[in-house]
């Protein structure tokens, strides 16, 4: 177990930034552990959700933003649903993931590559284009043979198309991405 000297590494601006971006009051968390008990991904996390919450309270910015847990969170909102103080824990995890992205932390590069490919596909097509996502992800990670055995099973079902979908409201989706980029630069 790593011993942390909180008086030396406490970053109050980090706590304020998380509270501002998430709209949540971090001091309401009293470490009951319900978030962690209900999380379906706790078994793969390096830091369980309640420890992430405690590390944020303790202003341990670098430890939090380096955590693999941020990238493995499925945002299923089980933690939010179980919180007795109505803290939107899933939103805090989202905010932390965005902060980690902005500051260049990617402890699980393949997960970040998947997120980047997914968001790029939605931005470009208005919704995800699965084949395009797959090609982008493979190009970024070099994982050519991972899951190749699934192709013959999936393609005959007609769920994956070789052309991007043509949807209504594609321009509105693009506006959301543009607005996010503008807000991120402030």
Image: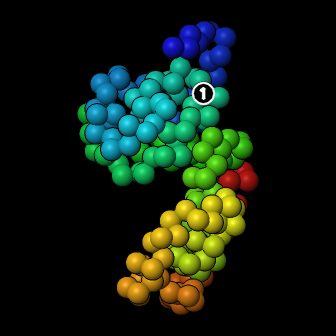
Q: Where's residue 84, x and y in %?
A: 26, 33
Q: Is residue 76 visible?
A: yes
Residue 87 appearing in the image: no
Give the total of numbered labels.
Answer: 1
Q: Is residue 28 left or right of residue 18?
A: left
Q: What residue is drawn where x is 48% and y is 76%?
A: 151
> Which residue carries the number 1 mark?
63
Looking at the picture, how far across and down is residue 112, in whole percent? Answer: 61, 53
Q: Secondary structure at mark 1?
A: helix
Q: Is residue 72 above or below residue 133?
A: above
Residue 54 x/y as whole percent: 46, 24
Q: Nearer the viewer, residue 23 or 127?
A: 127
Say which of 180 and 153 sits in front.
153
Residue at position x 53%, y 46% in the image: 71
Camera-side residue: 4 or 140?
140
Q: Quadrant of residue 39?
A: top left
Residue 128, image x, y percentages: 52, 75
Q: Nearer the viewer, residue 176 or 60?
A: 60
């Amino acid at each position: 177990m790593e011993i942390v000297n909180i008086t030396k590494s406490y970053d109050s601006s980090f706590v304020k930034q998380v509270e501002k971006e998430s709209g949540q009051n971090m001091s309401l968390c009293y470490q009951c552990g319900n978030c962690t008990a209900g999380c379906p991904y706790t078994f793969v996390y390096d830091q369980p959700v309640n420890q992430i919450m405690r590390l944020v309270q303790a202003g341990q910015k670098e430890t939090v933003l380096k955590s693999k847990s941020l990238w493995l969170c499925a945002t299923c909102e089980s933690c939010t649903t179980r919180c007795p103080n109505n803290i939107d824990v899933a939103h805090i995890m989202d905010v932390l993931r965005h902060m980690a992205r902005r500051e260049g932390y990617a402890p699980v590069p393949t997960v970040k590559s998947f997120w980047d490919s997914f968001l790029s596909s939605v931005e470009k097509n208005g919704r995800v284009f699965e084949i395009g996502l797959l090609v982008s992800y493979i190009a970024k990670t070099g994982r050519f043979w991972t899951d190749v055995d699934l192709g013959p099973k999936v393609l005959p079902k007609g769920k994956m198309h070789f052309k991007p979908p043509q949807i209504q409201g594609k321009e509105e989706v693009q506006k959301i991405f543009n607005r996010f980029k503008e807000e991120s630069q402030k």
